[in-house]
Structures are given as structure tokens and as C-alpha cells.
Amino acid sequence: MNQYFLSISGQWWLLVALALVAIGFSIFAYTNTIPQIAKTKKILLISIRSIALCILLFALFEPIYTSIQSLFYKPKLAVLLDNSQSMAADDASGNREKRYRALINSIDWSKFDDNILFYQFTDECKQIPVLSDSTLPLNGNMTDISKAFQTVNSIAEVQNVRAMLLVSDGAFNVGNNPVFDAENFAKPIYTIGIGDTTDPKDLSITSILTNEIAYIDNPIPITINFTSVGYNAQEVKITLSDNGQRLSEQIFNVNSERTNYTAIFEYNPKVEGTRKLTATATTLSDEITDKNNTHSEYVKVLNNDRTIAIFGGSPSADLAFIKRTLADEPGVKIQEYVQKQGGAFYNNPTPQLLATADVIVLCGFPIASTPANVLQSIAGELAKGKSLLFIAGLNTDYNKLKTLDEYLPWTLISSKANEFSVSTMINTDALSNPVLRINGNDEDVDLWNKLPPIFRTETFVKVKPEAEVLSNMKVNNVVMKEPLLLTRDFQNMKCVSIMGYGLFRWKLLGYAAQTKWNNNSEVPDLFETLVDNSYRWLSVRDKNKQVNIRTVKKHYNQGEKVEFIGDIYDAAFVPMENANVRVSINSNDIKREITLTSIGNGRYHGIVDGLSKGDYPFTATATLGSRNLGNDDGRFSIGELAIEYQNLRQNSALLNTIAARTLGKYYDGTDLSTLIADITKNDSYTVRPVQKQSETLLWNAIPLLIAAILLFATEWFIRKRSGLL
């Protein structure tokens, strides 16, 4: 039912009273006129003036006209159609694209009249006006079901979308877990599974695990993981290449009883720069696709000539073990400065010697008798961008260490020399940090947390905002908030801080005990792992540290936009926002150049698209006027990582879960006879009544003002024509 109201800002009785006064005044004004006029003309003039005055009075009371209309929005169905490449691939049951299109065409969409919205989604989701083969080309490089749910959810209330129909294989590879966004929709979601639920015959390289940083003539392990499904007693050759040049190969015999395999190569880099390591597997007979038989990763190879300055407050087991581990690194030169009783050193740390160091290690240093000038020299070298590895000690003087506070990942609160034992409690979110890398999987957490306890003093610190806590300490199985292992990478100054000592126990009571006493040869040496990883991470210093340009990802799918980000600083590491940053991309016959745009605080951004499949090196130059601020370089690839072909099996478990959690229904694609009835007869698939209210400000209406002016003008015209005074 529609309703209409007229309201004013005052009282109606007052308006009526004033209107009567206005009419009375008009009658009084024309009772006796000079000269006398005809009665009909007098009545006309009284009427015109009365109406005009009433209009003005009506406007002064600010009248508002309100209409309330009752509308009913019909329910709508949003159909989400998977437009990714996996929908066009063949699987164990045959041609998936043919079955997919036939299924879509078999549904009588006209049953929903015009109350249906079609969307196609890949890593993005967009509405399509007409459903056809051209609007569903099945060429998407990634699948983000969560983004599709979010897109529909954003317009669901306005459009009265009361249900969703998802047609997909359920194999999402980017974005959030779609189950959570499905639950946020809070309405039924019906799912149709496309593709076979059994694994097709396929050989796939799933990952390459290696160090991000390597050094010339310093071998590093390359772990290649691959899977084999549907093959028995087949020979597989895994080949490792460096920038397209074959390095080595291994032969495996795969069988039906095993799915996952691992090949471990040793890579000994010979050339400095960003190297592309590629793993390739032979294509087997009847393999569903060979697009996932290749995988690449990039390794930054650095010159291995490094000098490490190690400071010790006194001779100690930690100092000896750390020195021996670092000395085993090829190309590393050790400068050892151990303090004697008093302020003297066994080797005098002169400023000239310190200037040649690339990394500075403090082991139980400084102590109470450490000369202030030595700490000032260390601070001067750290100010130049050199890296720091700090390892606490029983006699560490934290008050003297305040000289280096600017370069540490924490700020001292208090410290006492009371000693107690602590164990590691690794934060799982920090596993991606290269300092903690062992095998590159979740099992690394257990390995770190099973280490023997070490020692620590009652030292309490406040972690700096830009620092990352890799491990907290655990005392008697109680996890404390105090950090045990921290890293900091801020304005090209790096630091690893270990807030405990007695690390040699990890070597003797951990690794040695397992290998010698328990005959466990597979246990990793975590002491050396921590020292080696820390050294490698700390020793990475870009030559042009004021200019850092990189791509968001190393591997892009074909058709995907390549996104560049950069950080530009001046010599004092103050962010620069007015630099000219140009990136040149060169690969065979393709040459592109883009200019990055400043987005504030020294950060720059740019996007390039339209690049074909291949490997692309790039160089970047930052200038300010005629002054060159620095250069940077890197590499990325396009179309080499076929993420859509990594999994060609229908994820029916996910589609079932989405339907069950939202009170919808899952269909396997063979029987859709009840689909339309299931949707339209659902209790939530109903019209939505809406009351639409509109207000018109009559006092501000132009026609009302025009009417009053015309009436007064007409009265004046008649008076003049009649000769009235």
C-alpha cells in the first residue's frame, strides 16, 4: 500500500489563521477603490492577491511532501562460471571443455526469467551480459573462488541475490579459502562439480627448494619435488639447468605405490648475478599434460670474497664453534678480536682493519672493560650499512651496548646477570624467514623446538616495530613473550640477534648426540644451519643500496600483468619521492621501457602487460635531475609456471563442503533434473519487500515561486490597466 503525507515546520492552525488574515487583508484593500471598478474585476483582484499571499505563507512554513511506496524485489540467482584454463583441459574422463559447455547449455535458464546474473571468474570476477562461448573463453591463468563469492556478496543486498550457483572443478590456486566467504554470504550456494574425481595419469614437478642467495664456488643443495600418478615401473629423468645450460640429471623409477619423489642436486655457481635454475622431467606416454613438467626458481649468486670481524668479550666455546663454522665457508676471511683482562685485545681492532669487514659478529661482547673507542668504531662501520650478528653472553654489558642501539632489533629495558636455562619456541609464521630454513616445510618447527636448552640472563627488551621475532623463549615448558631470536632489515641495515648463549650445546647435545650416540645420520646440524643461514642473509648487501627495484612475483602466467615496486633513498637513507625511475626489459626481440610512478614515502610502482611467454631480465635506473642515484637489475619469467595444470582433479570435497555449510546442494554434473526446483523452492529464495520513501521540499520548489511572482505581476497589470491608485 502506498502512502502520502504533507507536513510543515509549524502548526497547521497557525497557517490557516494567517491565510485567513491574508484573505481578509485582500478584501479590505479592495473594498473602496479609487476610482471605483466593476464588482467582477474587484473579486478577481481579491482572489489573485489572496492566492499569492497564501502561497508565500505556505512556503514560509517549509512544507514537505512525502510519499512511501511499497515495492517487491524478485529473488535473483547469481551463476558463477569457472573461466580458467583447467576447465578446457583433458582429465581422466576425457574432454572436460566439451562436457562443461554441454552442461551449461543443458540448463533451462529461462525458468528464472530475467532474474539471473551471470559471472565468469578466474583470479578476477566480472559480470557477463550474455552467456556464450565468446564470453566464456576458458583462458584464465588462475582460479580464485573466494574473489567470486566476495564480488556477488557486495551486490547481494541491493540486487536481492538469494542464491548462488557455482560451476567449477573446485581447484582454486589463489586467494582465501572459499568456504569462509561462502559462509559470509549466509544464503544457499549450489555447486556443480566439473571434471573427474580421480587423478589422471600425470608427472608433475611441484617445487624447487634452494637458497635465495648463493656464492661463487660454494656448492648449495637443490631439492626438486615431483609427483607421479598412474604410472608403474616407468623411468623418469629429472634434469637441472642453469640459465638453459644442462648441469646434471638423475634417473628415477616410479611406481603406482608411491606418489611423491625428491631429487637432490648440488649446484656450484661459477658466475655472479641472478641465475635461473630450471628442473625438467621427461614426458611419459599418455600423460594428461606436459605443461607441469617444468619448474624454475631464481638464485642470486654473489662474489664469495667476504671478511668477517668477530668480537669476543673473552674466549668461550660459542666463540670457538662460531669461528670454526664460518671459517668453513669458501672465500671467507676471519678477523678475530678477543678481549683480554682489562681493555686490551689479542689482536688490535684498528679502524683500518674494521673497514675491510663485511659482517660484524659480537659474541658475548661488549663487557664492562670494553674501550668506548672500539664500540664507536663498530658503530661507524654499521652506519655504512654493514650487517651485525649479536650473540649474548653471561658477562655482556648491555649498558655499553647502547652505543649500538640504533642497529639492534630491540631496545633494552633492564638487565641482571642472573642465569637460567631456556628452550626455543619457534613462531610458525616466521618459517619463511631464510634464517630458519632447513627443509622448507612445517617439519622445520619441530626440529628447532626439540633443540637442547641454552642459557640466558634476566635481560628484558622491547622489540622494535620493524624487527621480526623468529623465536620466543620457553622456560620449564612455559612460553614467555620475551624474544630469543630476532632479525631486523631496516633501511638496508641487517641484524640477527640471539638473546641466549651456550649455542655449542646445540652442536654437542643435539647434532653430535643424535649422529654418534643414536646413529641417526639424517638429523640436521642446526647449530651450523643457524650460523650459515644468518651469515648468508647478513652478507647480502646490494651494491646500489639506495635503489631497490623488483617484481612482485618471480613467475607470471601468460596474460598476467607484471607489477614492479621500488624503494629509492638518498645517501642518508631518507626516502625520495621525486626521482625518475625507469625500468628497461630486454629479451631477444622484445624491448620495453616503463617509468615507475611515485606512490609516496620513497616507494615507486609500475605495471607492464602484453608480454609473451619467456624469460625476461630487466635493468632499472633512478635519477634526480642529471644525478644518477643508482641502478638495479633482476629477472622474471612469463608462462613457464602452469599453475592451472598442477591439479586436474575435481575437488569434490570442497564443493560438497561449500554446499553443506550454506544449506545448498552439490551436483556431480550427471543429474541436474532437480536443480531449478531445488533453488526456486528453497525457503530463502523469496521476494524482498522494500518501502521506498521520497521527500519533496515544496518550499524550495521553483514552480511555487514562479506562481507567486506571476500572480503578483498579474495583479499589478490589471491595476495599471484599471487606473487604480
Image: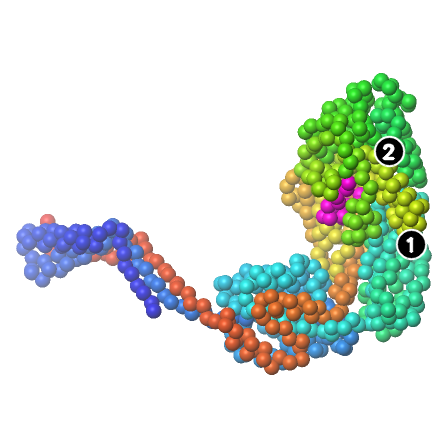
What is the distance, in whole Å, between disc 2 and disc 1 at their CAs? 32 Å
Q: Which mark is residue 318?
A: 2
Left or right: 67, with 534 as reference point: left
Q: Quadrant of residue 124?
A: bottom right
Left or right: 633, with 161 as reference point: right
In the image, the segment drawn in magenta is 423-436
Residue 694 in view (yes/no) = yes
Q: Give percent across and percent down for residue 57.
A: 21, 52
- Which secondary structure lies at badge 1? strand
Q: Which mark is residue 265?
A: 1
**Residue type at the position of mark 1:** Phe
Left or right: 294, with 120 as reference point: right
Q: Is residue 414 above or below residue 43?
A: above
Left or right: 694, with 20 as reference point: right
Question: What residue is at 60 percent from the left and 73 percent from the top?
Answer: 665
Residue 430 belongs to the span the image colors magenta: yes
